[in-house]
Amino acid sequence: MKKKTYAMILTSFCLSMFLPLLSAAQTQTLGELSAQYKSSSGLKQRQVARRILALGAEANSIVKEMLDSEDLVIRRNAHRNLRERFGDDALKYYEKALQDPEVMVRSVAVEDLITWKPRSEAVLALLQKAGKDKDNAVRKLAGDALWDFHRNYTVIRKRPEWDHVIETLQSQPLPLTGWRFRIDPGSNGHLEGWFAPQLDDSKWVDASIGHWWNEKMTGMVHNYEGIAWYRIDLEAPPKPEFEYNEAVLHFGSVDECTWVWVNGQFAGEFDIGTAGWNQPFDIEVGSLLNWGQKNQISVRVLNAAGAGGIYKPVELQILK
């Protein structure tokens, strides 16, 4: 009983000390908080900054200063919910934020842009810009907001329940030559249907695979970093009469991220960021193929750094 009484007395004492401080903080004017913000640093300045941000539109002039703060936490917090403060003028601040050296600031900008509805051309342009960010997390955050292609599966070679050796029963190399190629600096080819079987790609350039894309297209690509597309028509073999589990397009390696369509249908992706530049991977296509007929294959490639391209061979493999 004594312990309980002591605890109640201690709690009451702490509240009596804290509440006047809280009340004082709530009644501080914008001018007083502004002066404290400019005269403080470190944790104290962050605390004052939070109070200023809580004031709403009346603090907009100071918030503009916070957007350029050298303190990462203050700069990040100031970039949240800018549309509520500045309306459409917030876009110029988000555009600047996407050039910020810190991932935390760029991520906040993208998170807010994603919630911007309806999306104007200016908002779409900023999201597309963020979709080419050097940081994989920021890039995926923006890219996913503009991405309507999904196919969820675990490739047969990576299924944890598969308890026997995967056999390649039949393989057919895709041609190294005969591909069509086009760069996509605006990252909007998927929005324009560049994967469609009926697409007129006559103005695309002739290309080959099995090498970096800047090796044999130096006049066009140079050291291009960004999105580019490959297309080819593949004559698939007749559907196997023997028992098999899956057919895959096996990529030796692509620098660095890959998305694949077969006959206009999204087949899958391999997107683990820059770490994927030298990793082999499979895209399952068994249910999408026109067996014994022509098939249109479209491959979207992102090169974020370095040479880029489908620089190793690709095979159609039938697995068991």
Image (spheres, rainbow, N blue to C red):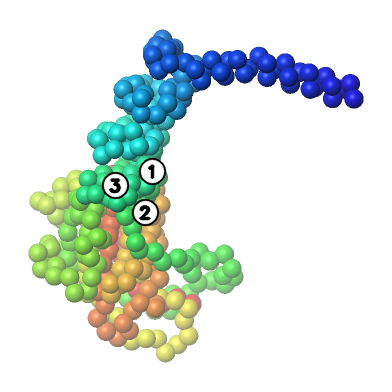
Q: Residue flagged by tag 1: what amino acid is it?
A: Glu
Of mark 2 and mark 3, the one earlier in the sequence is: 3
Q: CA distance from mark 1 to mark 2?
A: 11 Å
Q: Name the mark nearer the viewer: 1 or 2.
A: 1
Of mark 1 and mark 3, the one earlier in the sequence is: 1
Residue 52 drawn at (x, y percent): 42, 23
Please identify the quarter of the rendering in which residue 7 is found.
Answer: top right
- Helix, strand or loop under label 3: helix
Which quadrant of the figure contains the N terminus? top right
Q: Residue flagged by tag 2: what amino acid is it?
A: Asp
For this view, does 177 lie left or right of residue 37?
left
Q: Residue flagged by tag 3: what amino acid is it?
A: Leu
Q: Which of the pair 54/217 is nearer the observer? A: 54
Asked if 271 appears above or below 296 in the picture, the reply is above
* Residue 42 is at least partly visible in this image: no
Residue 195 drawn at (x, y percent): 24, 67
Of mark 1 and mark 2, the one earlier in the sequence is: 1
Q: Residue furthest right?
A: 1
Q: Which residue is mark 1?
A: 111
Residue 239 drawn at (x, y percent): 37, 86
Q: CA distance from mark 1 to mark 3?
A: 10 Å
Q: Which residue is mark 2?
A: 144
- Helix, strand or loop under label 2: helix
* Residue 202 is at least partly visible in this image: yes
Residue drawn at x 73%, y 19% is: 12
Residue drawn at x 26%, y 55% is: 309
Residue drawn at x 12%, y 62% is: 205
Q: Which residue is mark 3?
A: 127
Residue 300 drawn at (x, y percent): 27, 60
